[in-house]
Image: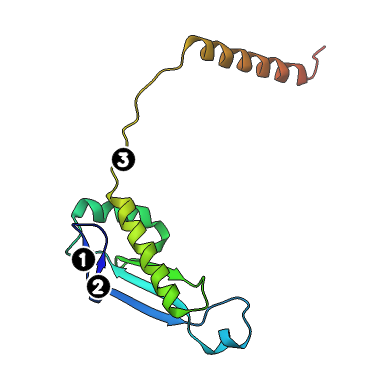
C-alpha cells in the first residue's frame, strides 16, 4: 500500500514495475545489474481516485501517459534498484498530490494609466524606427 494522503491509498497490485539495465557510465556493475525502474500505474482502472483527479492527473502527466491510460514513470538516478523503486514511487506520489491541489483563480485586473502610456510610447518609437529604415522615394 502506498499512502498518498489520509483519504487516498494506492494498492501495490495496481502498480507494475519493470527493471532494466541503467544507461550511462558506471563500469562493469551497470552491465550486470538491472537497476533502472519503469513504474506503470493504470489510471483508467483505478478505483480509489475520484474522476476529477483522474482527469487532472492525465493532463498533468502529459507525455508520461500512453493510449491504454497507464502513467509510465522511469527512475535511474541511483545505482541501487531499491532506491530507484522508492524514487519512482515518490514521483507518482508527487504527481497525484499535485493533481489534488486546487487551482487559484486569477483576479482580473486592468493596467493603470501610466503603464498604458508607457506601452503606447514604445509602440510609437518602434513605428518611427521602422519608418526610418524605409527607402526614400523620389
Identify the residue at horizontal 62%, vertical 80% (top origin): 26
Task: Locate residue 132 relative to residue 61 in the image: left or right.
Answer: right
Q: Which residue is labeled 1 in the image?
A: 46
Give the number of the disc on residue 14.
2
Residue count near mark 3 (Cα–Cα under 10 Å), binned few <14, some 14–19, many ≥20: few
Left or right, 67 with reference to 5: right
Which quadrant of the view contains residue 132?
Answer: top right
Q: Which residue is mark 3?
A: 103
User: Where is residue 63 shown, x and y percent of the image?
Assistant: 42, 60
Q: Residue at x 25, y 56 (%)?
A: 54
Return the x and y of residue 111 as percentages of the image width and height.
45, 17
Asked if the residue under mark 2 is in contact with the one under mark 1, i.e. CB atoms within 8 Å, the reply is: yes
Measured as percent of width and height from the top left, residue 27 is found at 63, 84
**In terms of image quadrants, where is residue 92?**
bottom left
Circles 3, 2 touching at the beta carbon (< 8 Å): no
Seen at 67% across and 19% down, the residue is: 126
Q: Earlier in the sequence, mark 3 or mark 2?
A: 2
Disc 3 and disc 1 in contact, CB within 8 angstroms: no
Amino acid at each position: 500500500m502506498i499512502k498518498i494522503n489520509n483519504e487516498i491509498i494506492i494498492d501495490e497490485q495496481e502498480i507494475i514495475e519493470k527493471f532494466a539495465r541503467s544507461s550511462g557510465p558506471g563500469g562493469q556493475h551497470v552491465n550486470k545489474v538491472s537497476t533502472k525502474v519503469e513504474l506503470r500505474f493504470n489510471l483508467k482502472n483505478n478505483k480509489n481516485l475520484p474522476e476529477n483527479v483522474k482527469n487532472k492527473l492525465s493532463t498533468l502527466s502529459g507525455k508520461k501517459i500512453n493510449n491504454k491510460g497507464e502513467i509510465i514513470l522511469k527512475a535511474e538516478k541511483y545505482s541501487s534498484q531499491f532506491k530507484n523503486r522508492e524514487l519512482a514511487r515518490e514521483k507518482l506520489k508527487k504527481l497525484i498530490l499535485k493533481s489534488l491541489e486546487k487551482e487559484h483563480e486569477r483576479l482580473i485586473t486592468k493596467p493603470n494609466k501610466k503603464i498604458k502610456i508607457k506601452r503606447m510610447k514604445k509602440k510609437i518609437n518602434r513605428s518611427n524606427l521602422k519608418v526610418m529604415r524605409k527607402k526614400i522615394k523620389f
